[in-house]
Amino acid sequence: MQPAIVFPFHDPDGFMFPHLQVITPVLKQNFSDAYLVVTATTRESCPQNIGWLAENSFYSLFLLQDDLPVGDQFTHLYRQVALDALPEKQLHLCFLDRLTFAIRTEHCPQFFADVQASAGEAFPLIFQRSNKAWKTHPQNYFKIENFITILGKILFGKTLDFAWCHLVIRTGLLREIMPLVKNSDMSVLAEMILQIQDKVKTKDVDWLAWEDPFLLSRDPVELRSERENSSAETHKRLAYAMPMIEALSQYSLAQQSQRMGQTRLSF
């Protein structure tokens, strides 16, 4: 059984749609189908693009009627997929910009080799950014997200990318964990990993290198320097990192409280 691919689609200016059209034939060769949540702004701004997707049987669309916080968009998509797909179905939860970069660059052969190698994996799997991939990113990106990973290591003893870009998971397990995901921001990604941390595996990959220079047709050194010296970019990263840090902290405190309660009951 081929896996399915799952990603949110927020593209009100139509920038990513041509990329999606280009990679669709390759996606069809390697995945059984694709699940997308389409934001209300995208649907209203680009009805022809959404019409093209709706007429393509490869795509199953969940159309949002109102603009929702980004975390709610994700949880709506993952909950709907968890109800729609077969329990044993393997799902690749990812993002279109990263997916486009992996397929339309020299990383394509390795990307699909990793997809195929993970096909028989029963446990959830995070494809994590390798050291080589991280070196292509601006340092403010790396330092902020790496702090979340370090905190997770301190609290839970495992090195995990809580701000993940690509998660492989079976439908049945996704169905179990989504009712436990409560937040409305990007920290839903961290909440999901917290629920599966005891069973999740990881694989470092180079194809999660920084995608923006390719998508924007910019010189990577120049663009990286701009982003590293931009306070707005740093605050943008902090805006999703801080709720993730809070999610990890609250989960750890809840575990500690539960352990203390069990200890008291044992006396």
Image (cartoon, rainbow, N blue to C red):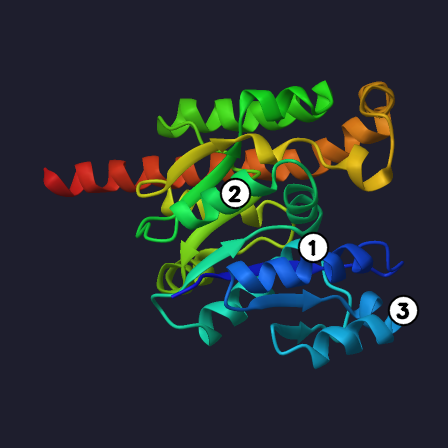
Q: Secondary structure at mark 1?
A: helix
Q: Residue 129, position in %: x, y?
A: 55, 30
Q: Where is mark 1, residue-wise?
A: 70
Q: Earlier in the sequence, mark 1 or mark 3?
A: 3
Q: Amino acid at mark 3?
A: Ser
Q: Earlier in the sequence, mark 2 or mark 3?
A: 3
Q: Is residue 113 left or right of residue 72?
A: left
Residue drawn where x is 43% and y is 34% of the image: 203
Task: Return the residue nearer the eye: 25 or 134.
Answer: 25
Quadrant of residue 63 in the image? Answer: bottom right
Q: Secondary structure at mark 3?
A: helix
Q: Amino acid at mark 1?
A: Val
Residue drawn where x is 52% and y is 42% of the image: 190
Residue drawn where x is 89% and y is 58% of the image: 13
Q: Residue 181, position in %: x, y?
A: 49, 55
Q: Where is mark 3, residue-wise?
A: 45
Q: Secondary structure at mark 2?
A: helix
Assess disc 1: are there few (<14), some (14-19) or many (≥20) residues with their C-alpha within 10 Å of its C-alpha. some
- Quarter containing the N terminus: bottom left
Assess disc 3: are there few (<14), some (14-19) or many (≥20) residues with their C-alpha within 10 Å of its C-alpha. some
Q: Amino acid at mark 2?
A: Ala
Judge depth for marks 2 and 3 and give the one in front: 3
Q: Where is mark 2, residue-wise?
A: 190
Tell me, yes or no, if residue 186 can be seen here. Answer: yes
State if disc 3 and disc 1 touch (CB < 8 Å).
Answer: no
- Quarter containing the C terminus: top left
Task: Return the residue nearer the eye: 56 or 86.
Answer: 56
